[in-house]
Image (cartoon, rainbow, N blue to C red):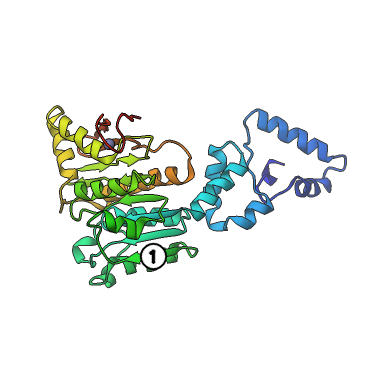
Amino acid sequence: MVKLLHYFHTIEYIYRSLRSKYLDLYKENINETLKILLEDNIIIKTYYTEKIQNKIPVIYDRERLFFNNIYNDEYCITNNAFKNIFTKKVTIIGLGGIGSWVAQSLAMSGVRNINLIDSDKIEYSNLNRQVLYNTSDVGKLKVFVAKDKLKKINPYLSINCFNTIISDVSDMKKYCYDSDVVISCADEPSTKDLGIIISKYCYPNNIPYIIGGGYSAHTGSLGITIIPNKTPCFECYVATHDKNINNIEKDFKVIMESTFSKNNGSLSAISGFVGNHISLDALKLITGFGKPYTLGKFIDFDFLKNTWNSVSAISQTNCIYCGGINV
Ligand SMILES: [Zn+2]
């Protein structure tokens, strides 16, 4: 009987398959055996009703099982997770060494509504870490190449491409007004200045946002993830960063400073590490499963020493956006 346990096989199917060999078998025997196997944790229960099967494309079979496991078989919650994945809109600003990984991962996870914002063309020197591009794409605009690649990964995608940069709050209003999550992966005008622009729009408009970290040589930094009215804002994070910078270990000081720098060197594996972590936190914001790893805090990794450090943002009492809110 154990060989017949598969989410495509109903109890009726298992019964019929065994009945010809075991003439005195009843359906109750199968139910009773399953109950014992479940109670002893020899098997786990997952749901694969026709209703869910019709709604969730087969591409996401393993992802559906992931949510089933997390939610302990409450398939209505799994359905709700997918409803959020399929309907919420994510804006990704910057499609370079971080943003290309974030976009790829979210598209693979089933996110269907994405705004892409970037003004750069693809260069040969991008190809060691920017996962969506190859040699035939050099010279083309990143937003359009990324759109084509992502649609091959996820045929249900609806993508808006904006060949531009975000330089002030009015740009945010123009391009991000319909976003459920905004992810910053760009360094124009600078990581810090862009983070402040995003924060000034997203915090008062109650849009969760991730200032997506970065990399420099053997280091990588993650976050910070901000949920308005639940965590301090990005400007308060910057104030915390500036206060901490003289009180931390020299190595991590270099990492924290480099997060706000441009033109850092990196490896594909480090870009992917940072980008995929950010993508996971974005998926947590979208679905509500688990707490984002970087919620209200910045985490940096030293890949030579295999050590990490984190700094939690502290809300400044006089902040007009988040005064007094701490995680
Ligand atoms: Zn604040």
Q: Amino acid at mark 1?
A: Asn
Ligand 1 quadrant in view: top left
Q: Residue at x 26, y 55 (%)?
A: 97
Query: Residue 11: horizontal and vertical position, in percent?
Result: 75, 45
- How many residues crowd around disc 1 within 10 Å: few (fewer than 14), some, or many (20 or more)? some
169 or 26: nearer the eye? 169
268 or 119: nearer the eye? 119
Q: Which residue is mark 1?
A: 160
Residue 116 lies, with reference to residue 271, above or below; the image says below
- Whether residue 146 is visible to the viewer of this picture, yes or no, is no
Q: Residue at x 53, y 54 (%)?
A: 60
Query: Helix, strand, or loop for circle 1?
Result: strand
Query: Residue 140: horizontal and vertical position, in percent?
Result: 26, 72
In the rendered view of the protein, which quadrant contains the N terminus? top right
Q: Residue at x 64, y 44 (%)?
A: 47
Q: Residue at x 24, y 70 (%)?
A: 138
Residue 168 lies, with reference to residue 278, above or below; the image says below
Query: Residue 10: horizontal and vertical position, in percent?
Result: 73, 48
